[in-house]
Image: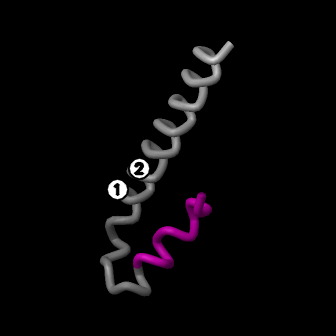
Amino acid sequence: MLAAGEIPRIAGQFGLDTSTKANLMGTVYAAQTAVNMTRTVIQAVAK
């Protein structure tokens, strides 16, 4: 996983507008949350 702070820096290198940082950070957070929830469900089902 990338550190959340790295996303805008990398996006800026590719010429993406970093003024959308808040939206980008929200997307990253949502994706990480979804991955964590999926892991939790898999672990619960596996027991």
| Residue 24, picture quadrant | bottom left
| Residue 22, picture quadrant | bottom left
Q: Taking 39 as reference, is 19 left or right?
A: left
Tell me, yes or no, whether the highlighted magenta stretch contains residue 3: yes
Residues at circles 1 and 2 in contact by the CB criterion of under 8 Å: yes
Q: Position of residue 6 (x, y in %)?
A: 56, 70
Q: Which residues, given as a range, are shown in magenta?
A: 1-11
Q: Residue at x 40, y 64 (%)?
A: 21
Q: Nearer the viewer, residue 40 or 2?
A: 40
Q: Position of residue 34 (x, y in %)?
A: 46, 36
Kindly identify which residue carries mark 2: 26
**Number of the label disc, if any, that sits on residue 23:** 1
Tell me, yes or no, whether the highlighted magenta stretch contains residue 40: no
| Label 1 environment density (alpha carbons within 10 Å; few <14, some 14–19, many ≥20) | few
Q: Is residue 18 above or below residue 39?
A: below
Q: Taking 16 as reference, is 42 left or right?
A: right
